[in-house]
Image (spheres, helix red, strand yellow):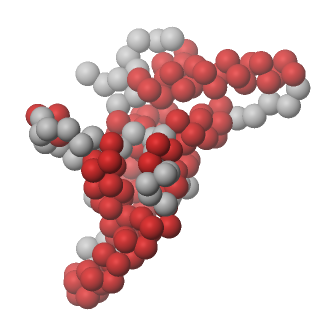
């Protein structure tokens, strides 16, 4: 998850293993509270600590500007281009012949453009499902919503993506 989400521009400053190590130190400090309360399954809890560490690093290194209104809400760090391309490949499938390669290249371009038009939560659901290969229960625990809501959001994200790819209006909810 860290390697998929760490912006390449930060590679000279931050190593993904350092982020993991800091998240594990956070976990060690908070483990007794977790064991008493067990607010969610262990992996989503640990992933949340890593996510929080990554958001802090991203904020510190990528958006070190004066405080603005748009920074009031917890931002979702955008996926780096390499991760977007990997997600595009997973969603677009693969072709083997030269003609299929051209079709796939066009499809990759269209999927990338459509992904950029999706709401952040749709992009996040698709990234968690396809890039991180998280299950519905794991996504549910991380987002603190029910499993049926995760499945519904996943389905709707794919429907919006499909509408955007087919050129229909209504790629986003009102």
Q: Nearer the viewer, residue 98 or 133?
A: 98
> Residue at position x 55%, y 42% from top?
83
> Residue at position x 44%, y 26% from top?
116
Position of residue 15 measured from the top left corner of the image (x, y, whole percent):
49, 60
> Residue at position x 20%, y 38% from top?
65
> Is 174 on the left or on the right of 5, as rendered?
left
Quick check: 94 above or below 142?
A: above
The image shows a total of numbered marks equal to 0
Residue at the front extreme of this rendering? 12
> Is 94 on the left or on the right of 152, as rendered?
right
Q: Nearer the viewer, residue 13 or 42?
A: 13
Can you see residue 128?
A: no
Q: Nearer the viewer, residue 161 or 8?
A: 8
Position of residue 41 measured from the top left corner of the image (x, y, whole percent):
37, 73
Q: Quadrant of residue 119?
A: top left
Can you see residue 12?
A: yes
Report the quarter where the C terminus lies.
Answer: top left
Q: Quadrant of residue 24?
A: bottom left
Position of residue 72 measured from the top left corner of the image (x, y, whole percent):
13, 42
Quick check: 76 above or below 117?
A: below
Position of residue 84 measured from the top left corner of the image (x, y, whole percent):
53, 37
> Residue at position x 51%, y 11% from top?
167
Residue at the right extreme of this rendering? 97
Quick check: 67 above or below 15?
A: above
């Amino acid at each position: 998850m860290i390697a998929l989400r760490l912006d390449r521009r930060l590679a000279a400053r931050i190593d993904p293993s350092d982020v993991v190590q800091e998240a594990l130190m956070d976990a060690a400090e908070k483990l007794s509270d977790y064991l008493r309360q067990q607010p969610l399954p262990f992996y989503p809890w640990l992933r949340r600590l890593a996510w929080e560490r990554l958001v802090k690093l991203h904020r510190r290194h990528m958006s070190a500007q004066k405080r603005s209104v748009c920074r009031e809400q917890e931002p979702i760090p955008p996926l780096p281009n390499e991760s977007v391309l990997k997600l595009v490949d997973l969603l677009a499938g693969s072709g083997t012949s030269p003609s299929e390669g051209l079709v796939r290249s066009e499809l990759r371009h269209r999927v990338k453009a459509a992904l950029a038009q999706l709401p952040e939560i749709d992009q996040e659901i698709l990234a968690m499902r396809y890039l991180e290969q998280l299950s519905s229960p794991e996504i549910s625990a991380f987002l603190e919503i029910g499993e049926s809501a995760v499945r519904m959001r996943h389905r709707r994200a794919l429907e919006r993506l499909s509408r955007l790819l087919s050129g229909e209006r209504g790629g986003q909810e009102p």
